[in-house]
Structures are given as C-alpha cells and as structure tokens.
Amino acid sequence: MLALAGCGEGEADDPVKAAEAHVQAKEKALDDAKADFEEKSEEFCGASEDYVTSLDRYGDVLTETTTTVGDVRDAGVELEKPRDEAMEAAETAVEAQLAVADARQELAEAEVALALAKDPSAETPAPAPAPSSPEPLAPAATVDRVEQAEKQFATAQEGITDATPLSQASQQFNAAAVALEMSWLRLFADAGCLSDEQAVQAESAVREYTVALQQSLSDAGYFDGEVDGVYGPSTVDAVKALQQASELPVTGVVDKATAAALQADLAAQGGASAQEDTASTAVLQQTLRLAGFWDGPVDGEWTPELTDALEDFQDELGVESTGTVDAATVAALEKAIAEAQEEDEESPSRTSVTASPSASPPSD
C-alpha cells in the first residue's frame, strides 16, 4: 500500500504522467462507449426487424379467417409491443451514440491538456475542438417519414369502429400498415442494419420492383414519366392517382388493395384491347372473303393462312406484301373500291367491298 501510495504521489507530482494517465483513461472510456454503441445498434436492428416482420404479418388482415372489424383492431393492438421495443431500442442507440461523441470530446480535451503539460512554455496551446453533434443514425427525412407514418397508422386505428364496414376497415388498416412498414424498412437500411451485400441486393430488388410497377402504372394510364426504377415523386403521384380513382386510401404506397386495383385496371384494358383486335381481324376476314381471297371462317382469329391471304390481296392491290394491314394497304384498298364503284356498281369485282380493315397479326 505504501508503494502504491508512493506511485500515486509521484504521478500527482509529475503533471505529464498525470496527464498521460488521464488520456489513457479517456481512451478506454471512448473504447467502452464505442462497444456499447455497437451493442445498442445491434439491439435496435433486431428490434426494428421484429417490428417490420410484425407489420408484414398483420398488414394483410383481410383473409378468410378475418370476419369482424374486431379482428382488424386486434391486429393493430398486437403491434404495440414490438413497436414499443423498437422505439425504445432506437432511443437507447441514439443515447449510446451521443455518449461516444461525449467520450471523443473528453479525450480531445485530455490530449490538449497533455500537450500543455509537456510544453508549459508554449505560447498558444492547441485548443480542444469544439463539441459537434454526431452524424445521425439515419437521415432526418427518414426519421420524419417514420414519425408521420406512425401518426397515420394511429389515426387509421382510431377511425375503425364497430360501425366501420369490414372491407373499409381492412383497406384503411392495410394501407396504413404497409406505408408504416415501408418507412421502417427505409430506416432499417439507413441506420446501417444491412451488410454491404444485403444493401446491394435490397437496392437491386427495390429497383426491379419499381421498374415493374412504373411500367404497369404506365400501361394503366397513371404514369407518364420515365421508367427508371426510382420510386420518386412522379411514381408516388401515379400510385395516389390510382388509389383515388379506385376509391382507396390515398397513401402513395402500394398495398394489397392498390395492387389488386392496378391488376384489375390492366386486365380490363387487356380485355378491351383483345376484343378490339378480334373485331378488327373479323373485319379483315370478311373483307378478304368479299374480295375473293379468303374462304375460311370469319371468327376473329388470326392464323398463318390469313396472313397468306392478306399477302395475296396486297399483291393484287400492287402494294408491298407485308402480311399486315398498313397504311399503304388501306389506301390502295380504298382506291380500288372507289374505282370499282365508278366503273359499274352492278358488276361485282374482287374489290367490291364496303369496309376497310384495321387489323394486324398479333405480336409475339
């Protein structure tokens, strides 16, 4: 004990040794703070992943087993525990990050004191760096989006009562849950919870999904921007337009009901297009029959034999044999009809038809 006391007194008498010991203590404190921050960050990533999983599980509440509005409300209540754990873990991680910043600042001050102890005659000792706020765990915009989505989710829950129709309750809950899930996924990624490889894979998956979504929205007439795989304002506006037209909650995020509405729009347009193609092909078949180039059925079905008949008809008209009804074919046909009518309306000819087709063979 006397020896230890002597060492302590020696350090106290030697300002350089005392300053060095102080620096060492602050270095250890910084290492401990960094380790604690890493641990708290991992806890946050785990808790947020659990919350996202819960949101994904309960986002699709309109299933065969969901028969009451109470089921919808219960699904929302069961999210409270994972949400609270994720929020608490986030606050703890932020506190640990601030502790790292404080420890780094204290170390810098200790190093300045050591430099001054080593050279007391220095005219101007190096000043300690001014305290600065640490880099946030995630961008402010990402955090704001999460907070806004949480509020919208709470509003959706409050708006569901026993008098709310089940379909409406499910749509409201699902829309809010999916929007909330997307915001937490963004926070999960921005907070560094993904490895470099996972981040690359996630970015690729999101881009591929967005390209497909933009193309579908474009085909349905809601999106007129560039199909670039970026879920930006124009894509959000297109999704909102679809939701508004479909009388769904307008969130700008594609949930189950929105995806179904988009597919219904595409199916309806595809059906109308198919009907139009069938009708046009039937007109062409009838035209070729009247002109004496087709003896098959008038059923609106395009076949290789119909292509051959059309090419023969085009040869007769003196236009290029393309096998499709192009502008040149229509113009030549209309001219032939006019000439035939002028010559003799009583004399039938191969071109004595009264309709001009607009069909083309289906594309591969």
Image (cartoon, helix red, strand yellow):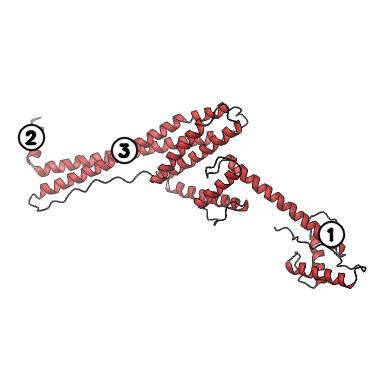
* Residue indicated by mark 2: 6
The numbered mark, 3 or 1, whose residue comes first in the sequence reads: 3
Amino acid type at circle 1 is Gln
Q: Which residue is situated farthest in the right direction here?
A: 346
- Residue 308 % position (x, y): 80, 64
Residue 41 numbered mark, or none = none
Judge by depth and name the residue closer to the eye, 65 or 261.
261
The residue at which mark 1 appears reads as 286
Q: Which amino acid does label 3 sit on?
A: Ala
Mark 2 or 3, closer to the camera: 3
Identified at 44% across, 40% down, the residue is: 148
Disc 2 from disc 1: Cα separation = 115 Å
115 or 152: nearer the eye?
152
User: CA separation, marks 2 and 3?
Assistant: 38 Å
Of tags 2 and 1, the one toward the viewer is 1
Could you classify mark 2 by the number of other residues whose Cα lies within 10 Å: few (under 14), some (14-19), or many (20 or more)? few
Residue 54 visible in this rendered orientation of the protein: no
Q: Residue at x 33, y 46 (%)?
A: 135
Q: What element carries label 1?
A: helix
Reading the image, the residue beneath label 3 is: 96
Q: Position of residue 70 (x, y in %)?
A: 56, 26
Q: Earlier in the sequence, mark 2 or mark 3?
A: 2
